[in-house]
């Protein structure tokens, strides 16, 4: 009868369900590109600025939009979905079958990681085609920084899920975390345009460090060890916290 | 052969003994009921059987397997319908069946199962759009997908309308007829009385009684109920003096005498002696409800 492995079947189901959620689809897959387009349509954002070292605002906003996709996926969507699964007994239901409910968690994490990466590619492509934003100058560094960033973001989302007892709380905590995450990612003011002191503080947050790392790689350089170290440390701490506090029911 | 064995089960939460020394055996092919008010420890007991909770003390075996240490063997022989469980609202019935079938090495025939449970017309329907009765049938299907030897049904019919409840009962009987042992958790007397071969009545974490439904009713001091129009000229003192009479009461303009077979016989001869006709006379067997109240001395909460 069934020849697919349970893990593959669970992942396929979660992908299918994700495509049936118009809200999640819009915020994760479409809104980052929409953000890029809206900002790109502002004429002054397409002009080189002395303050930004000859770069344009839109150049800075492409990595920011990529981070925005990650925040929507990992912090806003995933914790609510997972705590809903827990609250509605879906994880328990699964734990009475030969398949462990951790399979479902793994599928969710893989799904949101993949959704973020697809959304990132979309943002970068539209930025290049519509507004001539250069493709990442150092692609290897960019991919490395992005993967580490996605890991940190998903660990943050997993922690939000772990500390939220219900789906309602997960929505609330997710939103409460998403706003500072967006601020530090540079959604309102790009990190590069922040005052020095603020920039240094923001650089210690996962999305602030991510923003600087992605920007460095986009401009053709390598992210500093500080940014990569901050990201790795956050990933480790948040993964530990989520494993420590996660409850199956 | 014993399908489920529970010996000296104890479980405490936050200092409260939820299950306090529960023991019972369920034979293969039996429908075994666990009956009791909310908070009696029913669900905790079956969760220990399902391997979802680890007992503080006691021995649990399902087809010889220990639910806490032999998870993969257990999930191969045990199918579970959980109380208050859901599926993803946008998952269709067919997708749910396919997904859960992929979890088992040798799943049951999905099409035959869907047909038997009346799910064929709903295969393309999303779970969130199903009625309560249809959802429960999906959960029965999921419980049977692994071709189990034992199924646990926890509050299967809670929240269902009377018709869906009756349909669910027929399904439970058909499950047993296919050779599967059923552990049924319920707080409906009628359900337990109709379906179960034996019933364990749980009250405050202990087994208050364990017997066949008839045995439980017969054990009760009020196995028969005589009732008639209240205008009948009979002295209440005479009624109370009837052998085996447990109680005499007036309700809704009817006099009700609870007692045994002996009480009924004595009542008939009392009528003859007095030359009285009792209007609207009825003699009824007590229900499991009455037996339950009598056995545990507590109301269903």
Image (cartoon, rainbow, N blue to C red):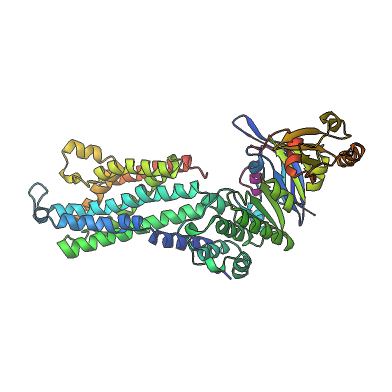
Q: Is A183 situated left or right of B267 in this image?
A: left
The residue positioned farthest toward the left in the image shown: A50
Q: Tell me if I can see residue B212 in this picture.
A: no
Q: Tell me if I can see residue A94 in this picture.
A: yes
Q: For the N terminus of chain B, which image quadrant?
A: bottom right
Q: Nearer the viewer, residue B264 or B104?
A: B264
Magenta stretch: includes residue A178: no
Write the start and end of the magenta stretch as one range.
Answer: B46-58
Q: Is B277 situated left or right of A88 in this image?
A: right
Q: Nearer the viewer, residue B70 or B280?
A: B280
Q: Nearer the viewer, residue B91 or B77?
A: B91
Q: Is B291 situated left or right of B133 in this image?
A: right
Image x and y of residue B135, in percent: 55, 57
Magenta stretch: includes residue B56: yes
Q: Nearer the viewer, residue B294 or A45?
A: B294
Image x and y of residue B12, in percent: 64, 34
For residue B250, which quarter of the picture? top right
For residue B176, which quarter of the picture? bottom right
How many badges with numbers are in the image? 0
**Residue at the image position 60 percent from the left and 62 percent from the top:** B104
Q: For the C terminus of chain B, which image quadrant?
A: top right
Image x and y of residue A151, in percent: 37, 50
Relative height, residue B163 to residue A152 (above, below): below
Q: Is B182 situated left or right of A172 in this image?
A: right
**Residue at the image position 84 percent from the left and 28 percent from the top:** B237
Image x and y of residue B36, in percent: 68, 41
For residue B23, which quarter of the picture? top right
């Amino acid at each position: 009868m069934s020849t697919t492995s349970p893990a593959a079947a669970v992942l396929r189901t979660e992908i299918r369900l994700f495509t049936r959620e118009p809200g999640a689809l819009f915020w994760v897959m479409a809104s980052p590109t929409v953000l890029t387009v809206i900002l790109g349509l502002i004429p002054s954002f397409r002009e080189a600025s002395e303050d930004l070292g000859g770069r344009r605002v839109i150049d800075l906003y492409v990595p920011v939009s990529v981070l925005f996709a990650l925040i929507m996926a990992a912090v806003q969507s995933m914790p609510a979905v997972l705590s809903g699964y827990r609250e509605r007994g879906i994880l328990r239901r699964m734990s009475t079958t030969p398949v462990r409910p951790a399979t479902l968690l793994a599928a969710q994490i893989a799904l949101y990681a993949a959704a973020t990466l697809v959304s990132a590619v979309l943002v970068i492509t539209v930025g290049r085609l519509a507004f001539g934003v250069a493709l990442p100058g150092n692609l290897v560094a960019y991919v490395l920084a992005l993967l580490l960033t996605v890991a940190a973001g998903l660990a943050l989302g997993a922690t939000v899920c772990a500390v939220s007892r219900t789906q309602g709380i997960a929505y609330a905590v997710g939103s409460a975390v998403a706003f500072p995450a967006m601020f530090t990612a540079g959604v309102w003011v790009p990190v590069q345009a922040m005052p020095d002191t603020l920039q240094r503080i923001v650089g210690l947050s996962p999305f602030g460090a991510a923003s600087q790392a992605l920007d460095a790689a986009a401009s053709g350089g390598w992210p500093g060890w500080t940014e990569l170290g901050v990201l790795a440390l956050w990933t480790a701490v948040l993964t530990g916290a989520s494993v420590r506090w996660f409850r199956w029911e | 052969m014993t399908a489920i064995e529970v010996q000296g089960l104890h479980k405490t939460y936050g200092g409260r003994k939820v299950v306090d020394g529960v023991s019972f055996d369920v034979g293969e092919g039996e429908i075994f009921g666990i009956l009791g008010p909310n908070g009696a420890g029913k669900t905790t007991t079956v969760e220990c059987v399902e391997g979802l909770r680890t007992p503080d003390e006691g021995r649990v075996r399902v087809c010889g397997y220990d639910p806490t240490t032999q998870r993969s063997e257990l999930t191969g022989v045990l199918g579970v319908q959980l109380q208050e469980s859901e599926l993803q609202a946008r998952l269709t019935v067919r997708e749910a069946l396919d997904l859960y079938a992929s979890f088992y090495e040798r799943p049951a025939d999905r099409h035959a199962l869907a047909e038997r449970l009346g799910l064929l017309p709903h295969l393309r329907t999303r779970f969130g759009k199903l009625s309560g009765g249809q959802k429960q049938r999906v959960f029965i299907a999921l419980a049977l997908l692994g071709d189990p030897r034992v199924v646990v049904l926890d509050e299967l019919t809670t929240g269902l309308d009377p018709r869906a409840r009756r349909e669910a009962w027929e399904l439970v009987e058909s499950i047993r007829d296919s050779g599967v042992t059923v552990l049924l958790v319920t707080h409906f007397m009628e359900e337990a009385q109709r379906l179960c071969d034996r019933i364990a009545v749980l009250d405050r974490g202990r087994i208050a009684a364990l017997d066949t439904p008839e045995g439980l009713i017969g054990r009760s001091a009020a196995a028969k109920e005589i009732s008639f129009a209240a205008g009948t000229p009979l002295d209440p003192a005479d009624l109370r003096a009837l052998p085996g009479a447990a109680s005499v009461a007036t309700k809704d303009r009817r006099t009700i005498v609870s007692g045994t077979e002996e009480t009924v016989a004595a009542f008939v001869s009392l009528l003859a002696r007095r030359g009285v006709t009792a209007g609207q006379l009825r003699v009824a067997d007590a229900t499991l409800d009455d037996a339950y109240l009598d056995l545990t001395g507590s109301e269903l909460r």
